Image (cartoon, rainbow, N blue to C red):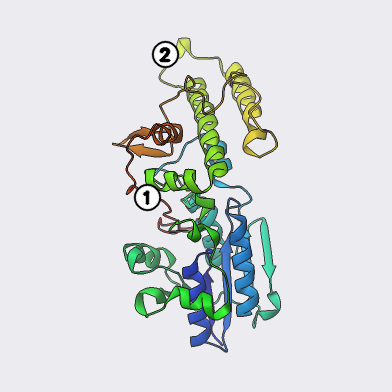
Amino acid sequence: MKNHIIFFSGGKASLAVADWVQEQHPDDNIVLYFTDVLWENDDLYRFINEATDKLQLPLLIHSAGINPIQLMFEKKMLYNSMIGDCSKILKQRVSANFLKRGKKPEHEEWRNRQYLRAEDFITDATLYFGIGFDEMHRAPAIIKNWAPFPVEMPLIDHNIWKDDVLKKYSIRQPVLYDYGFSHNNCNGRCVKAGQGHYKLLKDRMPDVFQKIMEQEHYLKICVSAYRYITDDKVPEDERIPDDIRETMLQELDDAFRDYFYDRAAKPKKYIHPAGSAAARYMEIKQYSFMKRDSKPYPIRDLHYEVEDDQQIDLFDIGGCGCFLEPYEPTA
Ligand code: SF4
């Protein structure tokens, strides 16, 4: 009996791959493997639960325990299409540590474990990814990254219709596809996405858009303050003394921590009491998730340009590079 591990992202593609693998290898040991970044749309969980139940395949869920915005807060960085290791830290590192080194993350959960046919489902396993023709450019990096495991991408090599598989199991597609998103990732708020993507988020999920606009805004304030306090370009004799600097950094962290961990509606300090992310006078240009003409383009700028009927680049979709970047676990 051979082992097969399907990287199950919660997208239609991964369901199609799971069905194909089960049809090809009905008597083998197959596991659906989902690395949860804890920032997903609720409907993604409905979809993966329905898939594991109806395909009668075990689902293993691993998580690093924090989401991308919390990771950025911990690192005091704002990610964008050019920099950012959220998928590397929250997905690749978690899965590579587990599959290549046998190291489990803090958070592990099984669903339908009774369908597991052998306890050792890793040795000599073939790994499967739901990469289609439109993402073929990602294939070489993924194959190289997962060596020595053999990797297969059935959607590239075989004629598989994702929507037919949905019909076969009577599973409703994740709601993000209904809204027009091309991926079911991070509840439509991928920090590497572009103008067209965020415009769609504003149109279809205004509450989510409002919240990510606020989070970007407060993260900018936090990161700017952090950079100011730790700036090592200041002449040595004018720098903040080490003990005061440590106190300031601690206060800064305390001011924002509850907000980014969803325990408070707003950061405690550093915010003008009358201020909000949408207030035109509160403007910090230096950092942003999106870039336009290689310059920071904050979500609030897009918000105003859309409100004012200005032109934005709807073809700038960008977004998820999850599992593209190489990650090699270290001993
Ligand atoms: S979808 Fe985007 S924000 Fe979410 S983990 Fe992947 S790269 Fe990061």
Q: Distance from label 2 to label 1 (Cα)?
A: 40 Å
Query: How packed is label 2: few (under 14 Cα within 10 Å), some, or many (20 or more)?
Result: few
**Whether residue 42 is situated above or below residue 196 in the rendered picture:** below
Count numbered badges in the picture.
2
Vertical order, 310 against 30 (above or below): above
Residue at (37% x, 80% y) in the render? 159
Q: Residues within 10 Å of mark 1 (few under 14, many from 20)?
A: some
Residue 119, by quadrant, is bottom right
Residue 124 visible from this viewpoint = no
Quadrant (top left/top right/bottom left/bottom right) for the N terminus: bottom right
The spot of residue 125 in percent (x, y) is 51, 77
Q: Element at badge 2?
A: loop
Q: Position of residue 114 (x, y in %)?
A: 71, 79
**SS state under label 1:** loop
Residue 94 in which image quadrant = bottom right
**Which residue does the image show at 69% across and 74% down from the upper left?**
112
Q: Amino acid at mark 2?
A: Pro
What x and y, as percent, mark residue 195? 38, 43
Query: Residue at point 54% right, 67% down?
Result: 99
Kindly tell me whether mark 1's CB lies below 8 Å from ligand 1. Answer: no
Taking the view exactly as shown, the residue that stands out farthest to the front is: 309
Task: Tell me the number on the disc at residue 235.
Answer: 2
Q: Amino acid at mark 1?
A: Gly
Residue 177 at least partly seen: yes
Q: Which residue is mark 1?
A: 318
Q: Is residue 312 left or right of residue 173?
A: left
